[in-house]
Image (spheres, helix red, strand yellow):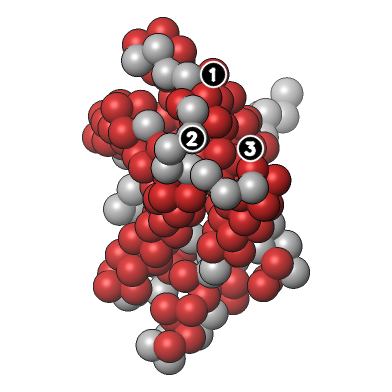
Amino acid sequence: MPNESLVIAAVMVGGYLLGSTPFGVISMRLAGAGDPRNIGSGNIGATNVLRSGRKDLALLTLLGDGGKGALAVLAAVLLTRGAPDATRHTLVALAAGSAFLGHLFPVFLRFKGGKGVSTFFGTLLAAAFPVGLAAAATWVVMALLFRISSLAALTAAALAPLFALFVFHSPHAIVTLTLFMGALIFVRHQENLRRILKGEEPRIGGGKPPAAPPEPPPEAP
């Protein structure tokens, strides 16, 4: 492996710049469909791009946001060929975490990015496929049961460290990566959490649930 300090810098800076690439903004602008920051929640992710009515652009955003994390991991794997396993695991985790941070705080959008779910899955599937697959299966099951995308994502993010540590006995660097990304996903979903607790979070394929009707005023004595 080349000079270790240079490799660390390369995977972190390169991962961050890859993660900063806003596929939702790029795909909508190239298609002449506007800017996702001006519709719906203002988020740059696939869920908000879908609110433009363009399923094709939402799919491109989903694949792009997941793929950039996977690409950062692949680059780290290639750069660490021949290195000890512990070094490889650490640099893969650094590359994945940097790409994730880039999506959340992209330099190209003045550090105002997405919530990280697609990039979370993309990096995890590339860095630790069994853990990523288990997290993705969790998302699918929760989405089918409750029809709430954010709840499915939060559950997957919460269980990923447990999958990594207790089920697949992943290296410490990968466990730390899942904890890091999971914690940031919860931070970025604070508003969603509040709406979930209030029963106001939109469901997949539907709008927000109707507000409860106001209670009638008490009758005069």
Residue neighbourhood size for the residue with mark 1, other residues' Cα within 10 Å, grouped as few (<14), some (14–19), many (≥20): some
Taking the image as shown, residue 37 lies to the left or right of residue 207, namely right
Residue type indicated by callout 2: Ala
Residue 33, picture quadrant: bottom left
- Looking at the rendered structure, the secondary structure element under dot 2 is loop
Marker disc for residue 172: 1
Q: Which residue does the numbered mark 2 point to in the structure image?
A: 83
Query: Measured from the top left, where is residue 60 in percent x and y?
Result: 33, 69
Distance in Å between CA atoms under marks 1 and 2: 17 Å
Query: Measured from the top left, where is residue 116 in percent x and y?
Result: 53, 48
Please state which of the two labelled residues, at mark 1 or mark 2, is closer to the viewer.
Answer: 2
Query: Measured from the top left, where is residue 139 in percent x and y?
Result: 34, 34
Residue 81, picture quadrant: top left
Residue type indicated by callout 3: Leu
Taking the image as shown, residue 168 lies to the left or right of residue 180, namely left
Q: Which residue does the numbered mark 3 point to in the structure image?
A: 184
